[in-house]
Amino acid sequence: MVRIIFVLFLVAVFLYIVNSYNRFQQLKNGAEATFGQIKVALKKRLDMISQLVDTVKSHAKFEKGTFEKISALRSGVAQAETPDDITNLENETRKLLGSINVTVENYPDLKTSTVVLELTQAIQDIENEISRHRYTYNNIAQEMNTKIDIFPSNLVASVFGFKKLSYLEFETEIEKRPDTSW
């Protein structure tokens, strides 16, 4: 009877060790995978910000340049004193109109406000994705670290060399929304 109890005890201890080891391994793999997702999201954020800011800048420059040219042409019309002045203004207006038509054909929905909204939404979506991944990683780290701290799972952790995970605590500069002004 004592042997049976001892064997059952050893089986229970063995099963506990296997279960604890497997849980530590799951947490370690989950942390590594989530950390990889955070890195991908950070790169995605940088890539998207770069692409969208370049797009917005080019559109905004186009619209700003267009409005400045239109204003200059309006002033030119008011100040025109000769037919040559009018001809020059007409030629400049046709060039401007051609440029606008080409741009509108290439970008039918060219509106800076729309692009800015898209930029803002894209940045917010990526910020939320990074936040979710950081939250998941920190939850995994908390569970892993708690298991390493408590008895008897701490014995399994020390035997198999599992180490505590560091929490992701981004610095203030990283947590701030990137400056997309130009």
Image: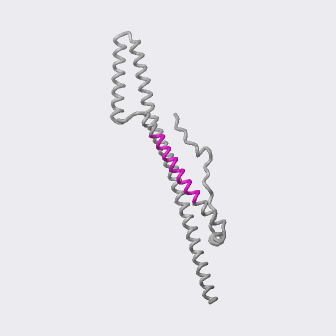
Question: Which residue is at the far top?
Answer: 81
Magenta region, main secondary structure: helix
**17 is higher (above) or lower (below) than 73:** below
Q: For residue 127: magenta?
A: yes
Q: Which residue is drawn at 42% across and 20% down?
A: 71
Residue at 57% over, 77% down: 15
State the image coordinates of residue 46 (x, y, percent, origin top left): 51, 46
Give x and y (percent) for residue 143.
60, 62
Q: Where does the magenta region start and end?
A: 118-139
Image quadrant of residue 19? Answer: bottom right
**Relative to 34, residue 174 above or below:** above
Query: In this view, which residue lies farthest toward the front?
Result: 1
Between 30 and 57, the one lying in front of the other is: 30
Where does residue 181 sit, x and y in percent of width and height? 52, 35
Task: State the image coordinates of residue 179 (x, y, percent, origin top left).
Answer: 55, 38
Q: Does the magenta stretch include residue 154?
A: no
